[in-house]
Amino acid sequence: MGLMTLRRQRSAPAGVPVGTVLRLAVLLQAGIGPEQAWRHLAQAGDATAGGVVDRMAGGADVPTALAAAGPAWHDVAAAWRIAQTVGAPLASSLRGFAAALDDGAQTRDEVRVALAEPTSTARLMSWLPLVAVGLGAALGFDTLRTLSTTPFGIVCAVAGLALIVAARRWSAALARPADPGDALPGIDADLMAIALTGGVSLERAERVVAESGGPPPDGQTRSILTLSRSAGVPAAELLRAAATLARHRARTEGRMRVARLSARLLIPLGACTLPAFLLLGVAPMLLSVLASTPLSL
């Protein structure tokens, strides 16, 4: 089970195809209507666009049809609905949102690439005790018979296998917090910036974001909104800068978590994997040697 967890962490689920959002923004900027733009993308072979067109044919509006494409598209659907509600330019809003999605995807990919090395090493080392069993047999020691028939060998086999399972689960538990997940850092600030681009008040922008399914503003976003109110300056650019900074911090913090993980994974290696190696590899060979050596009076 621990090995399966490590594999799931290494291969993240697919997110929003940024190219689809960018192509859509270009079509909208060229003066093509939203529904017709989705149809053009569907005719070009875009699978997501095909599903959106089918749902629109059933009576759904674009944001509803887009949200039904999967959890990865919920933020894009929220951005679309916000832009439509406040009258913000849809093409430029989508183009800016696509850049944010691309930045967030790069952040996740960088952290996951860095995470692949320590988790792969932990997974490889977890097989070491079982390799020792085969190595003993290859060297001519009757390790398998010793582990399966002698009382002390059975104890070694049970304890060694239990330590292998414990090492895998322990490694998976250590690696889990280091995974960046699929959430887009700074998404609340990006959506709020789209709402404010339409020229609505801060209070109205907050309501529109909430009604569109966007996340509530975090502490950093609220501090920027407070600054905008007190200073009387537009908050949209401040929010976009804050969202970019949030993704930069997420990238840095993710790399720091991976660096700490590399050291922490040595703990299950020393506490579980190496003892399992001794129990499954070394102990049966010693027992075989002792069993084959005649006692001298």
Image: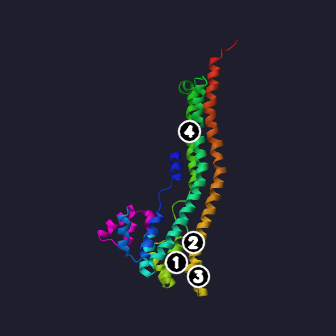
The mark nearer the N terminus, 1 or 2, is 1
Q: Do labels 1 and 2 touch, CB within 8 Å? A: yes
Q: How many C-alpha atoms fall within 10 Å of the one at disc 4: few (<14), some, or many (≥20)? A: few
Write down the region rendered in magenta: 46-74
Tell me the amino acid under the disc marked 4.
Ala
Mark 4 and mark 1: span between their CA atoms? 53 Å
Asked if the residue under mark 3 is in contact with the one under mark 2, i.e. CB atoms within 8 Å, the reply is no
Query: Which of marks 1 and 4 precedes in the sequence?
Result: 4
The correct choice, above or below, for 229 with respect to 294 in the image is: below
Sooner in the amino-acid sequence: mark 4 or mark 3:
4
Secondary structure state at the residue bearing disc 1:
helix
Circle nearer the viewer, 2 or 4? 2
Label at residue 37: none
Circle 2 sits on which residue? 243
Query: Which of disc 4 and disc 2 is earlier in sequence?
Result: 4
Name of the residue lying farthest toward the left: 58
Q: Main secondary structure of the magenta part?
A: helix
Alpha carbons under labels 1 and 3: distance apart: 14 Å
Label 1 vs 3, first from the N-terminus: 1
Query: Which amino acid lies under the numbered mark 2 shown in the image of this protein?
Result: Ala
Secondary element type, mark 2? helix
- Badge 1 is on which residue? 193
